RNA sequence: GCCCACUUAGCUCAGUGGUAGAGCGCACGCUUCACACGCGUGAUGCCGCAGGUUCAAAUCCUGCAGUGGGCACCA
């Protein structure tokens, strides 16, 4: 059989995926065992605009290992793929293209046409990542692929919205929200980021009416003073006690505002007096409500000053206004001082524009109430189980305990339209459809709310909506709750917790048993990979260079730890892949007469030492690999298989078997040796398959004696052709664990190693043969060595081996090495 | 400000109450009939610092330092 000396990953990668997919190997229906346990993962849906990055590759590898492992264990296994419509991101991308290619804005097209464009864009350019995922080898069930804007999922979203509205969890009202002046939409607290900023703190003086006293307030945003409707001090603050209730003349506006007392104010900070701008600051908004202060909106949606800011400022950008205000205060002699000050500003996490807090009418969801059930679930049943448990369980719990209302509405066109309609007489109707709304409203004259929902709203339903909710589908009954959610830590709040909330609310059960949080992959300098820094490593490039399987081993090893990307690691696993290839190649070159599954007949105590030994090692490798995967310790799993394959199987077992398997004459004994080799190899390929699907399939297909009978019983009745992915994952046979064989074999290994060491120390040429003198002192070792004599001679390049009772029997001029168990080996120097 | 994690060989990382590990790199020797993406042999670490608990600590506790992360309403 002609097999290339070097493994070519591309060839194997191109050969198998399409067949697996076409034959339905990824679908749970393939499992014909009605009593099979169920294993389910829903993929974190990548953005329709997205491209594969290392974080995806890491998550997908972990999910695929788990999926393939459970499938081989006979579980009815579903890994459900899909994509997210990614509201803002997609809309911006299409707008950009529209501008570039046709010089148009979305407003030129109008809403309906624009949305139509987005759909067309999605069909043409979207979902690039799905093709890239096939490259990774992900065994997802493409027949169940979902998109968050699918008709059915849209229905689920409306159902969810309506039910929450009916339960009083969703409300429409005025609130202070994060407004992105660039993207022109409201954002939730999770879509903005705090960033430290070296700015200034301005001390402004407000004159007290009817007196010459002034109250000094400190602010980082002087322009907002135009909207001040009060000044707050701590009620305990002696300095201002006499001013409580006093009236101040707000400079530049001619407005009179009063001094109020509020516990919130920290007397130790600044001057102890705080200007209050209820319409443009979250804390001031709260304070304003507490004291009945009026709200004056002085900044608009484009972050420009409004008419209410005064004629002199109207239309100015907020930063221009800031300069103007400060200048005016200076002219009036009311600017006490300006000091450098570092504080945090809030930015849009998408476009980095500075967020403007605005008072606005939006749709909100009271998350605090939804969070109760998940919190209880965690308290009482410890569900879901986080891996790693620290710190994520606490992070999750703390967040749920401190929830604010979620701003749901977005002033965008691409997304799930809010199912709310308004009548001409100002009533609001929330319904599952326009017809339902008409019936409820008793009129046809309805206007639907123009806004769409936050993208994460539909994501929150992903585990249930993809399985058919709100319908009671078979899939929902069978596959919910899901087994594990694998994702990155930055969406624990945005997504994980919200799926739990909706899952518990509507299904009465956890959305997933476990939550596995992957690590973060940094570049070699420890920097986060990002588009702007252009330091990202493209997984596809790594696949091209080293192969998918090698990359997957690295990613599986990374698992949940933060790590710096290192090509060396991939190279090392590329070498491992090549090692596997060549070990298999060697077995196949000597496979005439061999058959997988044979060669280990009879009682183990009739087998040769190294045969008992390798079977024992295989059992332990199997046991340890399974245990590691079950415990999500992928690093340990990879290490176990790596060392079993390379150290035990290649370095020792193949070497010990070599002479017999390459015997020139065919014989039942030679067939048996060859069968043992391919049998162990085949088991190793099964162990490796969840991690290295392509290489293992490529080799498995070539093994003699594998076929339909090799499949796991659950898949034998299916129409799928034989494939390693549907074989049974090896089960540990405890009776084959043979500590005695391992210890005896260890003695042989030690003997060989000591002799090799002596050869090196003495500079004996590799081709030169030595003599060995072994003194085993009647402790049983002599018999063991004697039984493995031919192998020992071969591995140490010894021409002859003699045994004696004591080391004194060896020639005086010998290099000696002590062996465990009191034995000694001597290499006579004579003739060297 | 509060909280958390991390700190182990030159590099990237495992590990664990009982004689320090892997891969890469390094040194030396090998075209030994599967593999030079290989084979053999070897060197390398006050396991961040300082205390404490223990017969025994890299491992548990306390403090400190450095790095990273999360949270926070300090105008």
Image: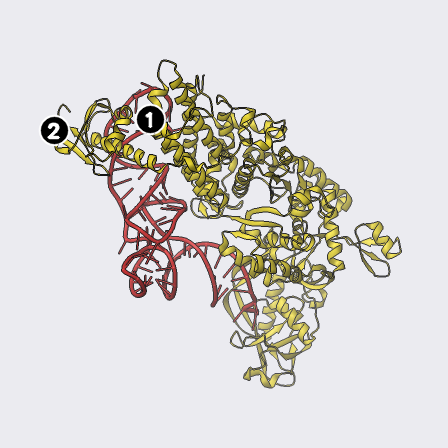
Chain colours: A yellow, B red
- The reply to whether dot 1 and dot 2 touch (C-beta < 8 Å) is no
Can you give x and y, in whole percent of width and height, for residue A690 in the image? 51, 36
Can you give x and y, in whole percent of width and height, for residue A17 in the image? 57, 29
Apparent side of residue A653 relative to residue A759 in the rendered image (left or right): right
Q: Is residue A673 visible?
A: yes
Up/down of A439 relative to A290, above or below: above
Residue A447, quarter of the rendered image: bottom right
* Chain ID of residue with mark 2: A
Q: Residues within 10 Å of mark 1 (few under 14, many from 20)?
A: many
Q: Is residue A95 visible?
A: no
Can you give x and y, in whole percent of width and height, for residue A484 in the image? 57, 46
- Residue on which disc 2 sits: A811
In the displayed image of the protein, which residue is found farthest to the right?
A443
Residue A622, quarter of the rendered image: top left
Q: Which mark is residue A11?
A: none
Determine the residue positioned at 42% across, 24% down: A599
Q: Residues within 10 Å of mark 2 (few under 14, many from 20)?
A: some
Q: Nearer the viewer, residue A167 or A357?
A: A167
Q: Nearer the viewer, residue A635 or B35?
A: A635
Residue A760, quarter of the rendered image: top left
In the displayed image of the protein, which residue is found farthest to the top?
A665
Element at label 2: loop
Q: Earlier in the sequence, mark 1 or mark 2?
A: 1
- Residue on which disc 1 sits: A656
């Amino acid at each position: 059989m002609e097999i290339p000396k070097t493994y070519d990953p591309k060839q194997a990668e191109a050969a198998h995926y399409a067949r697996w997919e076409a034959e339905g190997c990824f679908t749970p229906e393939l499992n014909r065992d009605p009593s099979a346990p169920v294993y389910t993962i829903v993929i974190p849906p990548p953005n329709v605009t997205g491209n594969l990055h290392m974080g995806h590759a890491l998550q997908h590898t972990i999910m695929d290992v788990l999926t393939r492992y459970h499938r081989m264990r006979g579980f009815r296994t579903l890994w459900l793929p899909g994509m997210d419509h990614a509201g803002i991101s997609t809309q911006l991308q299409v707008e950009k293209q529209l501008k570039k290619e046709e010089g148009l804005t979305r407003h030129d097209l109008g809403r309906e046409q624009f949305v139509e464009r987005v759909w067309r864009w999605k069909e043409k350019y979207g979902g690039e990542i799905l093709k890239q995922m096939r490259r990774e080898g992900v065994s997802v069930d493409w027949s169940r692929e979902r998109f968050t804007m699918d008709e059915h999922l849209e229905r689920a979203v409306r159902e969810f919205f309506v039910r929450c509205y009916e339960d009083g969890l969703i409300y429409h009202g005025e609130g202070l929200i994060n407004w992105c002046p660039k993207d022109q939409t409201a954002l939730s607290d999770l879509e903005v980021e705090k960033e430290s900023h070296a700015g200034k703190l301005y001390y402004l003086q407000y004159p007290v009416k009817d007196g010459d006293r002034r109250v000094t307030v400190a602010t980082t945003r002087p322009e907002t003073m135009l909207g001040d409707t009060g000044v707050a001090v701590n009620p305990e603050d002696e300095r201002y006690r006499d001013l409580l209730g006093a009236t101040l003349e707000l400079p530049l506006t001619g407005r009179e505002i009063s001094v109020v007392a509020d516990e919130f104010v920290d007397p130790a900070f600044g001057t102890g007096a705080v200007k209050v701008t209820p319409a443009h600051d979250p804390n001031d908004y709260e304070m304003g409500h507490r004291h009945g202060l009026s709200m004056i909106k002085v900044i608009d949606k484009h972050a420009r000053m409004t008419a209410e800011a005064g004629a002199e400022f109207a239309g100015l950008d907020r930063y221009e206004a800031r300069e103007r205000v400060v200048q005016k205060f200076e002219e009036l002699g009311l600017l006490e001082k300006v000091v450098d000050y570092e504080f945090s500003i809030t930015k849009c996490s998408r476009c980095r524009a500075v967020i403007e807090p605005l008072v606005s009418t939006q749709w909100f969801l009271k998350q605090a109430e939804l969070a109760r059930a998940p919190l209880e679930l965690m308290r009482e049943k410890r569900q879901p189980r986080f891996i790693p448990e620290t710190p994520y369980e606490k992070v999750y719990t703390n967040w749920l305990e401190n929830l604010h209302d979620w701003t749901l509405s977005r002033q965008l066109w691409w997304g799930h339209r809010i199912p709310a309609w308004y009548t001409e007489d100002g009533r609001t109707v929330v319904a599952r459809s326009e017809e339902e709304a008409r019936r409820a409203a008793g009129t046809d004259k309805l206007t639907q709310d123009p806004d769409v929902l936050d993208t994460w709203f539909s994501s929150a339903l992903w585990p249930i909506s993809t399985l058919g909710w709100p319908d009671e589908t078979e899939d929902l009954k069978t596959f919910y709750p899901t087994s594990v959610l694998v994702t990155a830590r930055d969406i624990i709040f945005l997504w994980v917790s919200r799926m739990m909330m909706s899952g518990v609310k509507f299904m009465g059960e956890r959305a997933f048993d476990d939550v596995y949080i992957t690590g973060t992959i940094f570049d070699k300098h420890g920097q986060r990979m990002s588009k702007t820094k252009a330091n990202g490593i493209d997984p596809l490039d790594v696949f091209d260079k080293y192969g998918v399987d090698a990359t997957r081993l690295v990613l599986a090893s990374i698992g949940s730890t933060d790590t710096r990307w290192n090509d060396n690691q991939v190279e090392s696993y590329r070498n491992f892949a090549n090692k596997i290839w060549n070990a298999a190649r060697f077995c196949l070159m000597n496979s005439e007469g061999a058959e997988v599954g044979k060669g280990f007949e009879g009682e183990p105590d009739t087998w040769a030492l190294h045969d008992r030994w390798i079977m024992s090692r295989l059992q332990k490798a199997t046991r340890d690999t399974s245990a590691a995967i079950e415990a999500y310790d992928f690093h340990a799993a990879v290490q176990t298989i790596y060392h079993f394959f390379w150290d035990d199987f290649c370095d020792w077992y193949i070497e010990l078997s070599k002479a017999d398997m390459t015997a020139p004459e065919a014989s039942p004994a030679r067939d048996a040796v060859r069968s043992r080799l391919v049998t162990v190899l085949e088991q190793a390929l099964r162990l490796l398959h969840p991690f290295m699907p392509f290489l293992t399939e490529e080799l498995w297909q070539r093994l003699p004696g594998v076929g339909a009978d090799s499949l796991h019983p659950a898949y034998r009745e299916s129409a799928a052709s034989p494939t390693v992915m549907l074989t049974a994952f090896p089960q540990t046979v405890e009776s084959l664990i043979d500590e005695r064989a391992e210890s005896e074999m260890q003695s042989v290994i030690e003997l060989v190693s000591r002799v090799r060491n002596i050869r090196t120390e003495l500079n004996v040429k590799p081709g030169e043969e030595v003599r060995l003198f072994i003194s085993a002192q009647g402790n049983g070792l002599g018999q063991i060595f004697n039984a493995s004599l031919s192998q020992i001679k071969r591995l140490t390049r010894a021409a002859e081996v003699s045994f004696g009772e004591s080391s004194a029997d060896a020639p005086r001029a010998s290099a000696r090495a002590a062996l465990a168990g009191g034995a000694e080996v001597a290499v006579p120097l004579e003739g060297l």
